[in-house]
Image: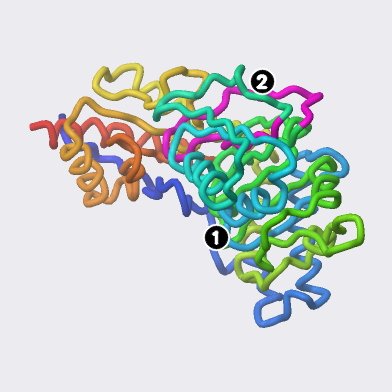
Amino acid sequence: MTKPARKPQIPNFSSGPCAKRPGYDVAQLDLRALGRSHRSSLGKALLGACSTETARILGLPAGYRVGTVPASDTGAVEMALWSLLGPRGVDMLAWESFGSGWVKDVVSQLKLQDVTRHEADYGLLPDLSKVNFEHDVVFTWNGTTSGVRVPNGDWIPDDRAGLTICDATSAVFAMDMPWHKLDVITWSWQKVLGGEGGHGMLVLSPRAVERLETYVPPWPLPKIFRLTTPTKTGGKLMEDIFAGSPINTPSMLCVADYLDALQWCDRVGGLAGTIARSQANLKVVEDFVATHPWIHFLAQAPETRSNTSVCLTLDLPAEQVKALAKLLESEGVAYDIAAYKDAPPGLRIWCGATVEQSDLEALMPWVEWGYGQVRG
């Protein structure tokens, strides 16, 4: 095959940090808060907008709290696990590396005894019908390193007894999520909207707040994990965290960047618009895979295919797959698309909303050309 002439205008297909929004220019950010205290009236207003604007765009139910927390999605998940788990048994779902990490934390660090694991290999989902919702349930909505997502929320009952704790870092703003079935939702700014790293978002349902205020974990909690202040009967939610006063000092530059991303989200049609962009991007890859028999989705079932972290396997030895990723990078057409280090050898192409469909359309012929080059 002749080397393609057309290249993606923006070859950034990393699954995190992800591509900045189209037309991004740091000079366009509202930088009034740089050099100011995050506890100033301006700082609080901007941080408060991170919560209120997020809730508005996502259409979160009344009573759901949205807060900015330390340490990206990892910090948000750990806060939830350490603060909420314990009074019930726990069902842990894992089908890729990050979900497996949460299993290890619950079993090895929190040392909970009543833990049921539902695990599956890369490319598959565990049997969701076997999940016990009398327990608390911890799962990722979208497996970033496997490209496998839960197809919907139908498997989660409305009358569940336990809490659902959902790591949704590569799903929020890209997938239609049933918020009323989720009690804790976490994500990070550097995923679907292409924000900067280091900050997490934590959403709590009223049921999660009730657990926080009536249950005191038996283990010590570091300051950055504490969501309540002690009372005689348990604790009182630190409402300030969800109203513009986070636990520790955030980057006000990153705050400005996130608010810029939210404004862009509005300009492309809000949540429906960002979901549609991600779906259109996935369609480009689906059409390519359908006509090239040597490349395959790692996700075994079509309804479980991610529309953000799209993971592919190729009919090549592992070393040739790595060589392909390096070749595409050296040609300046695709950066950071090798599969995650713990996943099966392959390609992982970010198709979230900030990626332009035209760039994916330009990329796929290069994948075909590179396949021919490394195959020999």
| Kind of element beneath mark 2 | loop
Give the position of the C terminus as an image quadrant: top left
205 or 273, which is in the foreground?
Answer: 205
Q: Measure the alpha-carbon separation of dots 2 and 1.
A: 33 Å
Horizontal side of 42 relative to 74 (left or right) equals right
Nearer to us: label 2 or label 1: 2
- The disc at residue 196 is 1
82 or 5, which is in the foreground?
Answer: 82
Horizontal side of 8 relative to 29 (left or right) equals left
Give the position of the N terminus as an image quadrant: top left
Position of residue 351 measured from the top left corner of the image (x, y, whole percent): 47, 38
| Residue 141 magenta | yes
Magenta highlight range = 135-161
Q: Amino acid at mark 2?
A: Trp
| Quadrant assignment, res 226 | bottom right
**Which residue is the site of mark 2?**
155
Q: Amino acid at mark 1?
A: Glu
Q: Give the colour scheme of this rendering.
A: rainbow
Image point (50%, 34%), residue name = 94
Image point (16%, 37%), residue name = 320
| Mark 1 residue crowding within 10 angstroms, few (<14) / some (14–19) / many (20+) | many
Image point (83%, 38%), residue name = 61
Position of residue 274 measured from the top left corner of the image (x, y, whole percent): 61, 38
336 or 8, which is in the foreground?
Answer: 336
